[in-house]
Image: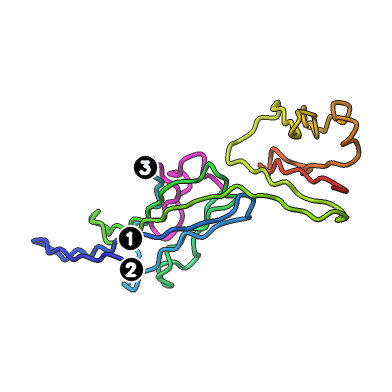
């Protein structure tokens, strides 16, 4: 953890730079990017979370979140403490992390004059899941989530290692007639996979 203090002509700027590594498996419901402070924060501070491409992940100002400033790929996928200034907890929860979220994230805190008070750097690594299952279990879930908005006309195809179609979803419903016979009646997906951005597959009797 690196800390530095700089004296300006009009005020003292305190800057705390810390770096943390956060690891999570793809398919987890959420991941917490930690950012806490020991300093008292005024109600007029601005908190920005940005990713390594400088896209705004989450913005808090004037006592509330500012979803209109978020980049589209993070809409509805982030949340912060409801009493973050009082609790001095500026941590960010990122919902439905995927390997597309592998990135650096910064938490930046500014005062009303635009001076930077604090900077915290997080490195998020979302790992692909190796699914292991014992013979005889009733079912196994193969996780697959996306952060992208999916149109109703997308086609989702699950295939096995030799190219056979395990499951097909298109036009708002499953397409069992396209499945390989070996997988008939043995697969299912989320009832609202596009809306929930959850394309995971449950395979029965593996």
Left or right: 44 as drawn, with respect to 66: left
> SS for tag 1?
loop
For marks 2 and 3 on the same chain, the one whose residue lies earlier in the sequence: 2
Q: Left of 179 or right of it: where is 163?
A: left
Q: Secondary structure at mark 2?
A: loop
Find residue 44 and report its horizontal and vertical position in percent: 33, 61
Q: How busy is the neighbourhood of tag 2: few (under 14 within 10 Å), some, or many (20 plus)?
A: some
State the separation of the CA atoms marked 3 and 1. 20 Å
Which residue is identified by label 1? 45
Q: Which residue is mark 3?
A: 54
Residue 51 relative to residue 39: left or right = right
What is the x, y in percent for residue 197?
66, 42
- Picture layout, residue 14 above or below residue 103: below
For the residues labelled 2 and 1, say whether their Cβ atoms are less than 8 Å apart. Answer: yes
| Residue 31 locus on image (x, y percent) | 55, 57
Relative vertical location of residue 140 with respect to residue 117 in this rendering, above or below = above
For the residues labelled 2 and 3, the Cα–Cα distance comes to: 24 Å
Q: Which mark is residue 41?
A: 2
164 up-or-down from 187: above or below = above
**Is 56 colored magenta in this rendering?**
yes
**Nearest-to-viewer mark from 2 and 3:** 3
**Residue at figure coordinates x 50%, y 65% from the top left:** 82
CB-based contact (under 8 Å), mark 2 and mark 3: no
Name the residue located 81 percent from the left edge and 56 percent from the top edge.
134
Along the line of sight, the residue nearer the viewer: 43 or 5: 5
Q: Name the one closer to the observer, 70 or 3.
A: 3
Where residue 136 sits, quadrant-wise, is: bottom right
* Real-space CA distance between mark 2 and mark 1, rounded to the nearest whole angstrom: 7 Å
Q: Secondary structure at mark 3?
A: loop
Q: Which mark is residue 102?
A: none
Q: Which residues make up the magenta segment?
A: 55-76
Name the N-terminal-most of marks 3 and 1.
1
């Amino acid at each position: 953890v690196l800390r530095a203090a700089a004296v300006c002509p009009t005020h003292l700027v305190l800057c705390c730079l810390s770096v943390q590594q956060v690891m999570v498996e793809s398919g987890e419901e959420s991941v917490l990017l930690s950012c806490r402070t020991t300093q008292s924060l005024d109600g007029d501070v601005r908190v920005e979370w940005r990713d390594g491409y400088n896209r705004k992940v989450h913005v808090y100002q004037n006592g509330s979140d500012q979803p209109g400033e978020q980049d589209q790929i993070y809409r509805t996928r982030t949340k912060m403490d409801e009493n973050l200034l009082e609790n001095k907890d500026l941590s960010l929860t990122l919902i439905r992390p995927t390997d597309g979220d592998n990135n650096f994230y910064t938490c930046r805190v500014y005062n009303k004059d635009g001076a930077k008070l604090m900077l915290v750097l997080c490195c998020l690594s979302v790992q692909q899941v190796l699914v292991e299952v014992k013979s005889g279990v009733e079912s196994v879930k193969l996780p697959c989530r996306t952060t992208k908005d999916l149109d109703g006309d997308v086609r989702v195809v699950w295939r096995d290692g030799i190219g056979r179609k395990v499951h097909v979803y298109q036009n708002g419903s499953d397409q069992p007639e396209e499945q390989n016979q070996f997988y008939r009646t043995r697969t299912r997906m989320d009832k609202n996979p596009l809306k929930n951005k959850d394309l995971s597959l449950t395979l029965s009797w593996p």
